[in-house]
Structures are given as C-alpha cells and as structure tokens.
Amino acid sequence: MSQKFTPDFKETIVRLHVEQGRTLQSITKEYGVSKASISKRCSNYSKECQNRAETQLHRRNEVEIIQENVRLRKELEEMKKENLFLKKAAAFFAKEIK
C-alpha cells in the first residue's frame, strides 16, 4: 500500500538530502520513506530547477546555489578546525618560549 505524503513533507525530505547532505539511509530510518522514493523526488526537484533556470537564463540555477552553499559550509567547517588547531599550536609554542 503506497503512502500519501503532503507536498510540504516531500519538499522537507528533498531539502534534508540536497541541502543538508543527509544520507538516504538516515532519512529512510527517520521518516520511513523508501530510498527509491527519495531519489525520485530529488531527481524531479533537480529537473524542475533546471527547467526554471532555462526559462530564466539571467538567474542562477537553484541546484547550483544549493551545491555551492553545501560546499561553502564544508569549507567553513574545515577552516574552523584549522583555526582551532592553530590557536592550540600557538598556545603550546608560547608556553615553550617562556
């Protein structure tokens, strides 16, 4: 028996995977939606975004914006880790100099 999901719920599932980078397995466990269903919805979302981008050539593709956002978030996390490491190293070497 197939389940009926609201459009808002479907959008939430897609955003969890596309924007937040959640795995299909974690979404499946949490919400009880099949992996195939999530993949299909993500594919449809990507096609919709591409169609919108083609009709509005002056605007950036929404999928590209989301992908860039995800990339920048990962980059920010990496920079935060590096910054924390450098602070610890500076503190360590400051103690060694005294």
Image (cartoon, rainbow, N blue to C red):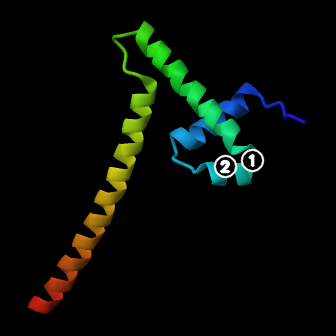
Give the quadrant of the C terminus.
bottom left
Q: Secondary structure at mark 1?
A: helix
36 relative position to 90: left or right: right
Single out the residue that lies furthest toward the top. Answer: 55
Q: Nearer the viewer, residue 24 or 68?
A: 24
68 relative position to 63: left or right: left
Q: Tell me what residue is drawn at x 58 percent, y 37 percent.
A: 15
Circle 1 is placed at which residue position? 31
Tell me the amino acid under the disc marked 1.
Answer: Tyr
Q: Nearer the viewer, residue 32 or 73?
A: 32
Q: Nearer the viewer, residue 26 or 87?
A: 26
Write down the quadrant of residue 88 in the picture.
bottom left
74 relative position to 41: left or right: left
Question: Residue 70, image x and y in percent?
Answer: 42, 43
Q: Nearer the viewer, residue 8 or 51?
A: 51
Single out the residue that lies furthest toward the right. Answer: 1
Circle 2 is placed at which residue position? 27
Single out the residue that lies furthest toward the front. Answer: 36
Q: Tell me what residue is drawn at x 45 percent, y 29 percent.
A: 63
Above or below residue 81? Residue 31 is above
Above or below residue 90? Residue 31 is above
Give the quadrant of the N terminus.
top right
Question: Residue 33, image x and y in percent?
Answer: 74, 43
23 relative position to 1: left or right: left
Question: Residue 52, image x and y in percent?
Answer: 48, 14
Q: Secondary structure at mark 2?
A: helix
Q: Are marks 2 and 1 in contact (CB under 8 Å)?
A: yes
Q: Tell me what residue is drawn at x 40 percent, y 30 percent.
A: 65
Q: CA distance from mark 2 to mark 1?
A: 6 Å
Question: Residue 64, image x and y in percent?
Answer: 39, 30
**Mark 1 crowd level (few <14, some 14–19, many ≥20, 10 Å Cα):** few
